[in-house]
Image (cartoon, coloured by chain):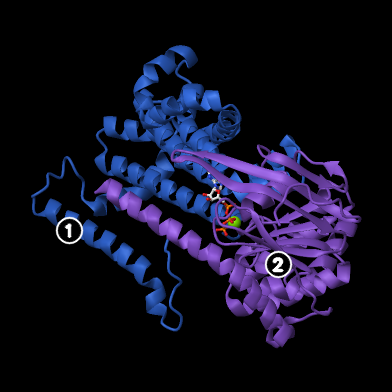
Chain colours: A purple, B blue
Amino acid sequence: MSSSSPPRIAGAILTVDDVTVRFETPEGPVIAADDVSFTVKDGEFLSIIGPSGCGKSTVFNVIGGLLTHHEGTVRVAGETINGPHQSIGMVFQEESTFPWRTVTANVAFPLELTGMPKQKRIERARYFIKMVGLDGFENRYPGELSGGMRQRVSLARTLASEPKILLMDEPFAALDEQTRLLLGDKVLQIQQQLRQTTLLITHNITEAVQMSDRILVMTYRPGKVKRIVDIDLPRPRTSEIVGSEAFGRYVAQIWNDLREEASRGLRDEEAHVLHHEAASS
Amino acid sequence: MSAGAPARGSPWRAFAPAATGLGTLIGFLLVAELLIRIGVINRFIVPPPSEVIESFGRVIVEEHVPRRFLLTLSECLTAGVMITVFGVAGGVTMHRYKLLQQAIETWVAALAAAPVVLAYPLFMVIFGRSAWTIIMIGFVAALPPVMLKTLEGLAGTRKVLVNVGKSFNLTQNQQFWKILFPAALPTIFVGVRLGLIFALINIVGVEFLINYGGLGQLINDLAERYDLPGTYAAITFVILVSVVFFMALEKVERWLRPVD
Ligand SMILES: Nc1ncnc2c1ncn2[C@@H]1O[C@H](COP(=O)(O)OP(=O)(O)OP(=O)(O)O)[C@@H](O)[C@H]1O
Ligand SMILES: [Mg+2]
């Protein structure tokens, strides 16, 4: 499945080709991503799922152009990238709002860079603030908002730059389950409204099945592509499909794939700890 | 200063810390007064607090305290502007050129700990017995905290914020002005506040040492005249000024930092 050079898919807006990333650590080289290849079609919602430490964020950083010491290529609409690309918008795993800017000023940030006049900027920012459901909080500072609201500010800020491809690295990982489900609905709604091409990185199976057209499952160390699963669930979707039978089948199938990897990861970490304990005693 | 929110409903709770503080101070003064009156402490070395308080009005009117205060204040502000400009610029330069940082960071930190006042004869030779000697000593003594805090603020900018900037394709300049600098601003202000306090201490100290200028010189004068209650009144005045100064800066700092 993870064979090299997938066939060029017509309409592929993002092509990841044989990407390998190696980190040198004091304990020897770590291969964080190994020959990762996949494509994302225009308007598609693809999720990458995999156990913790398998290299998801690494792939995210390579596609976002923040990590450049990789092998292989990443192409956006045919153009090979070697640095942050205009067409790609990133939402990070960590909290990333600017605490010194109000919600509006945060969201207007990318518009400021394009030199859009102030009045227009504020109008545009309002539009995206409303889209993520934060109207009424325009003049608040991030410090006055909850974690979930701040993540929505980050999302709105990235959306305001109108990226061709939206890249999200576990944007809701730090949130509680209810907030996560509600935000998932919000993202689905936005995706359907904007027909936004989206690459979501997650380790939450429900989230992935609920939102995706396809799900890419990664293996644990080295992080390879284990399988790509098509999710044939009708759209538009909401969190209500979570209860359906077809949904359950997909979850079970992916959990099956993932369980192997996750337990391998766990064993690996335990061995690591034992090794350290042995070394230090 | 006080961390917890004042408890609602009970006014005593809200004022308890301040009242306890004031009470402790008054208690201390009463004990001192008593010890001096019964002769445990020699009143020719330490005047009784009551006499110090009495001489307050006299010192303020007769010794032109308002004029001296303005003089010391203007020295502080001049030094303050200088440490802000040069300290922030220095910190930014150290941040930008890692080699420079590695080369001088330790020295700057050492300078922060050094008693710069002791070098006052050198400054006298260069600047003469003038306000500039005083200002320059205040400046040199107060520069390190501003530089170091600026560096700390810039270097401590969360990586993810820098990455957000990169993902939006910011230029080096934009990255600095739109992300690093605002992120570092609260820390920079802590440096400036520390610097101003260092400057104030050193400026009053040098005024005292070289017997020139504002409040420090007044203390020197009064001590030389052996007007002990007056001397202590002047010292108390300087302390009060410092405290008010410190509290005002804290207010400004909190206002500059709307949220965390
Ligand atoms: N800068 C780095 N230097 C050395 N090793 C790194 C570095 N960044 C990541 N790694 C290693 O690469 C592997 C993959 O890391 P990555 O952050 O991509 O995992 P992840 O799948 O995003 O995990 P999580 O789900 O916990 O976020 C890990 O084993 C990690 O230790
Ligand atoms: Mg990660």
Q: Estimate how packed mark 1 is, as few (under 14), some (14 to 19) or many (20 or more) residues with alpha carbons within 10 Å.
A: few
Q: Which residue is drawn at 34% across and 50% down?
A: A275
Residue matched to label 2: A152
Q: Mark 2 lies on which chain?
A: A
- Whether labels 1 and 2 share one chain: no
> SS of the residue at dot 1?
helix
- On screen, residue B224 above or below A29: above
Foreground pick, B238 / A205: A205
| Location of residue A234 in the rendering, given as x and y in whole percent from the top left corner | 83, 80
Q: Which amino acid does label 1 sit on?
A: Val
Residue matched to label 1: B31
Q: Mark 1 lies on which chain?
A: B
**What mark, if any, has residue A156 been given in the picture?**
none
> SS of the residue at dot 2?
helix
| Location of residue B260 in the rendering, given as x and y in whole percent from the top left corner | 56, 59
Left or right of B131: which side holds B201?
left
